[in-house]
Amino acid sequence: MTDEPSPRAELMLPVEPGELTPITLTGAHLPAETPRAPSFTAEEIDAIRANVEASDAENTKRAYTGAWASFVAYCNAHDATALPATPEALAGYLSHALRQDGKLYTVGTLNLHLSAIKRAHRERGLTPPHGHPLVYRVWKGIRRTRGTHQQGAPALTADLLAKAVKAIPSGPRGRRDVALLHVGFAGALRRSEIAALRLCDVVLHPRGVRLHVVRRKTGDDPTYVDVATGSPAAEALFSWLDVLATTTTPLSLEPEGSGTALFRAVHETFTGPRIAATGLSEGSVRDVVKRRTGLTAHSLRAGYATTAAELGQSLAEIRDAGGWKSIVTVDRYIRHRRQFGADAPRAKVQAALAAEQAEGK
């Protein structure tokens, strides 16, 4: 009696256009009728959990956690299940969701709440009620009655930034603040990204300085912000590095450990300025921008987009430079401001009209 050959099948997978390479599957490796999850060790589970936790920025986690807690509280108060939620529960929540001050949430905030509720369902294999006609009609009505326009942060454009830094004193703290503003503007950085910069993220380049930046919100791969020698950002950064190098605070270029932060607190003492070993927090970055410019930290990012648009850069160019996910997001920053640029369509029409009037005189 001879052994029968093992069952055999071939799975064709494309490798290059126009080419198929067979992968031979035999015996136990044939496709199973039902999927079976692997058995994980505790260490493997911890590794998976760590990667899941790293998929969102801390601000996103807090926003989603708060949104979900608000929805659960509403469902509990109305004797409804939050998971899975019914279309009626979601429609009622959208219509009557209140902030802690008793006012209705804005459309933009409710949109974030919808995303949090959808994620809570999908990550547990449940179908969210978002696509139900009742939810669709309620959401459409809310958008029409409350409006969808978001004011956004005011733009700290190039001219406003130049005026702001000119008024900053030239001491150690002033040199830090000038560098912080210029770097934040040059890279269209968020305050979390500014606070996260380390000394090892500053790389000298034959043509200037290259900053290694991790986009904190979108979770993109690390990117680089290049500032040329002689530019305001490079000169301000060199000036601040000189301050760090001449203090008694130990500096470290290692990725981890104390003394690694690029921007840190400056304390005035009887013996001279003392530079803290730890970096500025996101809140401290916000306070620096507010104190020096009167605007929010996000105004640096908005200002970059606005200035770039007024100089004629395309939406795609601005998106790539600032690490935005889409040109739709960029357009929200500049839609109501770019029209003052010389290359804006409306400005060109007005310029043509002015030329015609001057010629007719």
Image (tube, rainbow, N blue to C red):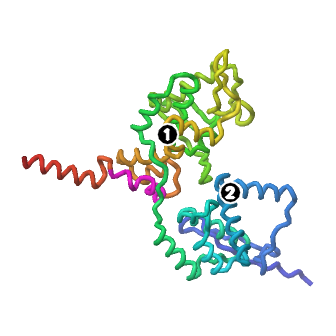
Image position of 158 (left or right of 360): right
Magenta span contains residue 331? yes
Residue 176 to residue 313: above or below = above
Rendering coords of residue 340 (x, y %)? 32, 49
Residue, disc 1? 294
Instruction: Tell me if mark 1 has few (under 14), some (14-19) or many (20+) residues whose alpha carbon lies within 10 angstroms of its own.
Output: few
Rendering coords of residue 90 (x, y %)? 63, 75
Rendering coords of residue 254 (x, y %)? 71, 32
Residue at 66 percent across and 61 percent down: it is 64
Residue 132 to residue 265: above or below = below
Element carrying mark 2: helix
Residue 42 to residue 216: above or below = below
Element carrying mark 1: loop
| Tag in front: 1 or 2 | 1
Image position of 145 (left or right of 70): left
Magenta span contains residue 87? no
Q: Would residue 253 be seen by someone viewing this image from the given angle?
A: yes
Residue 100 to residue 250: above or below = below
Residue nearest the viewer, comparing 232 with 78: 78
Which quadrant of the figure contains the N terminus? bottom right
**Type of amino acid at the residue the image marks with label 1:** Gly
Residue at 58 percent across and 73 percent down: it is 95
Residue 258 image-quadrant placement: top right
Looking at the rendering, the stretch of residues picked out in magenta corresponds to: 327-339
**Type of amino acid at the residue the image marks with label 2:** Lys
Q: Which mark is residue 350?
A: none
Residue, disc 2? 61
